[in-house]
Structure formats: structure tokens, C-alpha cells
Image (cartoon, rainbow, N blue to C red):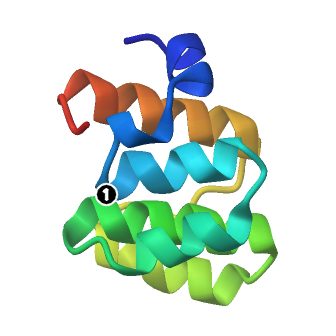
């Protein structure tokens, strides 16, 4: 699945971190955050970090990037979102 296909796919195809990113891609930050809070592990922390960075809570985002084992991001949010979706899709994290 490509990022373009992901954007228009039905949410029922996804779970965990990809479901959170799908909701964010639909413009529903609150639902994305609800989902991300329930995703264990580094991928959940990564999505959680991205969402807090998008929210503007950089200190909170830095904490979650640390939990994900990743350096804090500072670039374009949409580019980060696409990289995350691509990586998770390549790993088969549906």
C-alpha cells in the first residue's frame, strides 16, 4: 500500500500506530491521540511524539521521542507523517 492509498483507505484496515496516523491524516487529532495513547512500545511512542509536536507541546514531544528511541524531529510535520506511514507500511504494521 502506498501513502496515497493509505490516505483514502477505510480505517477498519488499520490498528495501532497506523490507525492513529490515519485519524490524524483525516484531521482528527483528538481521535488520533486517543488511539496513540493505547499503543504500547516504541511505535506508539513515536506516533505520540509526533502528535504532541503537532500540538505544539515540544517538551512532551521530546519525552515521547525519547521513549521511542528517536531524536526529536523539527522539520515539516507532513513530511514526518509520510515517513512514519511509509516505514510502518513497509514493516507490515497494519
The residue positioned 72% from the left and 37% from the top of the image is 78
* Residue 84 vs residue 11, the one in the foreground: 11
Q: Position of residue 26 (x, y in %)?
A: 72, 43
Q: Position of residue 75 (x, y in %)?
A: 72, 46
Would you say 82 lies left or right of 53 here? Answer: left
Image quadrant where residue 60 sits = bottom right
The residue positioned 52% from the left and 77% from the top of the image is 34
Disc 1: which residue: 16
Image quadrant where residue 84 sits = top left
Q: Position of residue 79 (x, y in %)?
A: 67, 33
Q: Position of residue 64 (x, y in %)?
A: 44, 78
The residue positioned 47% from the left and 85% from the top of the image is 63
Would you say 26 lies left or right of 82 here? Answer: right
Q: Is residue 76 above or below residue 82?
A: below
Which quarter of the rendering shows the N terminus? top left
Mark 1 lies on a secondary structure that is helix
Disc 1 packing (10 Å; few <14; some 14–19; many ≥20):
many
Q: Does any portion of residue 85 appear in the rendered image?
A: yes
Image quadrant where residue 42 sits = bottom left
Would you say 91 lies left or right of 82 here? Answer: left
Count of numbered circles on the image: 1
Q: Is residue 12 above or below residue 29?
A: above
Which quarter of the rendering shows the C terminus? top left
* Residue 64 vs residue 32, the one in the foreground: 32
Q: Is residue 88 above or below residue 56?
A: above
Q: Does any portion of residue 71 appear in the rendered image?
A: no
Q: Is residue 7 above or below residue 77?
A: above
The residue positioned 48% from the left and 40% from the top of the image is 11
Amino acid at each position: 500500500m502506498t501513502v496515497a492509498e493509505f490516505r483514502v483507505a477505510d480505517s477498519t484496515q488499520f490498528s495501532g500506530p497506523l490507525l492513529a496516523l490515519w485519524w490524524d491524516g483525516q484531521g482528527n487529532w483528538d481521535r488520533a491521540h486517543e488511539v496513540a495513547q493505547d499503543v504500547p512500545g516504541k511505535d506508539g511512542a513515536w506516533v505520540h511524539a509526533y502528535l504532541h509536536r503537532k500540538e505544539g507541546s515540544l517538551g512532551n514531544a521530546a519525552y515521547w521521542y525519547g521513549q521511542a528511541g528517536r531524536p526529536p524531529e523539527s522539520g515539516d510535520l507532513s513530511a514526518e507523517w509520510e515517513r512514519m506511514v511509509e516505514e510502518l507500511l513497509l514493516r507490515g504494521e497494519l
